[in-house]
Image (cartoon, grey):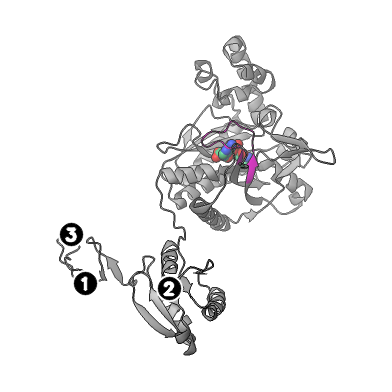
């Protein structure tokens, strides 16, 4: 048997429905924020990530899927979405448009990581990028996107952590301070951190091996190395976050694992029981300078990305009930060949009129078809038989109340419109309500079971 590669997942069944629901919420959220969907290639020239994400990052030194294609070109499966969007922005000369350009994407990314919960080799990110504005309001607005998304999805336990790396001058000063601080401790750091000290000392703060080492914990803080302008900018971002009523914590050691950041960086953690250590569900920041690094004009940018897998996992752990469609409105049943022909055209007609319909495809008898309809959670059954069809009629049965009626085919759409649109999700009429006794009654029905707000002891 051929199995899937390590660190990858098949998205099937109910899990797939949950993802589609999350993606639907994302699309509607992005409409509200007026971001345009963008799709860039899953593979790009390797150079894009080496220059864009940074030679000193773990992602590029250890985690990229690199290969030569048949034309001997160096190709890399994208480890993240920002570099591709920036390449597209430059290549399509989007900087010529009145800015800012606001785009979002939702696609698979590839990192050769050691697979564990929340860390996959193939994973999906929803991300946004705003190119062409240095307004601190953009920083706050971008942070507000995942916050509102998680809220819309019903995720409660989230913590927003922010920090500022400042502009180039501030970052350089901080870098020098880190080198000075870490040099005497070099023998106490892991092998990778020794290398990082030479190439990119900020990465030491992000080290997964040394993360509990007290040397890291006592390291200089970014905030102490911000120049006046960067400090002022950070204050403005924070004040806009307050205007947007977004709770946040300043985490002075937050630096992020990619090279392109400056000024605002942020991470959103899910503080959900059982989530494990990879609990950052969304992260991002400002990357003024990346467009120039990739040969474009000076452009200020801000963005973020969230891992959909980690997000769905957090929703599952919080037992959030997602309104996924797990039923069909109609199941059309038949036995004879003439009934089957009629079923085929009826199903087509009903689907064309907007109903969610299924039918029988494996030659089951009527009894087994009833079972299949139950498995599909069918709300109504349309039971065809040759006798009724002679009179242009069909039997239609409410699969919950088991009430059955014979309806003229000409009248069928009116019947369905009346019964399905007025029906509650649970199969009961809208003006009925569920009492604490578990029965359904009309809204003002007086029950007698003795519970508060419900006084029923009679069977429906
Ligand atoms: P990142 O922090 O590398 O940032 O990834 C963002 C999110 O993608 C993480 O918070 C996590 O939810 C998810 N993620 C990352 N790696 C994995 C993995 N191996 N398995 C599962 N999920 C994962 C970026 O990628 C930046 N491009 C974000 C950004 C956009 N910054 C500015 N614009």
Residue 130, magenta (yes or no): no
Q: Which mark is residue 445?
A: 1
Is the residue at mark 2 in contact range of ligand 1, meaning its CB lies under 8 Å from it? no
Q: Which residue is mark 2?
A: 381
Q: Which residue extends farthest right?
A: 71
Q: Is residue 367 visible?
A: yes
Mark 2, residues whose alpha carbon is within 10 Å: few (<14), some, or many (≥20)? many
Q: Which mark is residue 350?
A: none
Q: Quadrant of the C terminus?
A: bottom left
Of helix, strand and loop, which one carries label 2?
Answer: strand
| Residue 302 horizontal/vertical position (percent) | 62, 42
In this figure, what is the number of numbered marks? 3
Q: Nearer the viewer, mark 2 or mark 1?
A: 2
Q: Is residue 124 above or below residue 211?
A: below
Q: Alpha carbon of mark 1 to alpha carbon of mark 3: how far?
A: 14 Å
Tell me whether the residue at label 2 lies in contact with that at label 3, contact meaning CB atoms closer than 8 angstroms: no
Location of residue 426 by image quarter:
bottom left
* Side of 434 where 299 appears, left or right: right
Residue at 29 percent across and 70 percent down: it is 432
Q: Is residue 233 visible?
A: no
């Amino acid at each position: 048997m051929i199995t899937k590669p390590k660190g990858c997942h098949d998205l099937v069944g109910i899990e797939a429905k949950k993802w589609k629901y999350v993606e639907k919420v994302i699309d509607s959220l992005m409409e509200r924020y007026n971001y345009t969907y963008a799709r860039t290639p899953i593979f790009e020239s390797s150079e894009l990530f080496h220059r864009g994400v940074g030679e000193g990052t773990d992602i590029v030194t250890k985690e990229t899927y690199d290969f030569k294609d048949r034309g001997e070109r160096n190709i890399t499966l994208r480890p993240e979405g920002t570099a591709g969007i920036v390449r597209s922005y430059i290549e399509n000369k989007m900087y010529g448009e009145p800015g800012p350009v606001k785009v979002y994407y939702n696609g698979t990314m590839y990192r050769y990581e050691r697979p564990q919960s929340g860390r996959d080799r193939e994973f999906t990110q929803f991300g946004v990028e705003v190119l062409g504005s240095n307004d601190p309001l953009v920083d706050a607005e971008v942070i507000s996107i995942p916050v509102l998304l998680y809220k819309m999805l019903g995720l409660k336990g989230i913590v927003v952590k922010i920090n500022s790396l400042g502009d180039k001058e501030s970052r350089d000063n901080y870098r020098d301070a880190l080198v000075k601080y870490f040099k005497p401790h070099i023998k106490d750091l892991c092998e990778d951190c020794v290398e990082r000290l030479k190439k990119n000392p900020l990465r030491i703060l992000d080290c997964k091996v040394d993360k509990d080492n007290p040397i890291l914990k006592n390291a200089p803080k970014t905030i102490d190395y911000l120049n006046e302008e960067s400090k002022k900018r950070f204050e403005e971002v924070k004040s806009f976050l307050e205007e947007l009523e977004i709770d946040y914590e300043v985490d002075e050691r937050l630096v992020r694992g990619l090279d392109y950041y400056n000024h605002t960086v942020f991470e959103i953690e899910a503080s959900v029981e059982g989530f494990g250590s990879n609990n950052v569900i969304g992260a991002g920041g400002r990357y003024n300078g990346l467009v120039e690094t990739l040969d474009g004009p000076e452009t200020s940018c801000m963005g973020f990305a969230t891992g959909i897998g980690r997000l769905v996992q957090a929703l599952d752990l919080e037992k959030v009930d997602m309104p996924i469609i797990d039923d069909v409105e109609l199941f059309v049943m038949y036995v004879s060949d003439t009934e089957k022909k009629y079923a085929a055209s009826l199903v087509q007609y009903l689907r064309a009129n907007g109903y969610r319909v299924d039918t029988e495809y494996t030659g089951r008898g009527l009894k087994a078809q009833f079972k299949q309809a139950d498995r599909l959670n069918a709300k109504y059954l349309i039971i065809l038989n040759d006798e009724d069809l002679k009179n242009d009629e069909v039997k239609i049965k409410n699969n919950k109340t088991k009430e059955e009626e014979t309806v003229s085919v000409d009248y069928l759409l009116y019947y369905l419109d009346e019964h399905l649109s007025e029906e509650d999700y649970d199969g009961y009429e809208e003006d009925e309500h569920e009492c604490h006794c578990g029965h359904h009654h009309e809204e003002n029905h007086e029950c007698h079971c003795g519970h508060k707000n419900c006084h029923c002891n009679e069977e429906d």
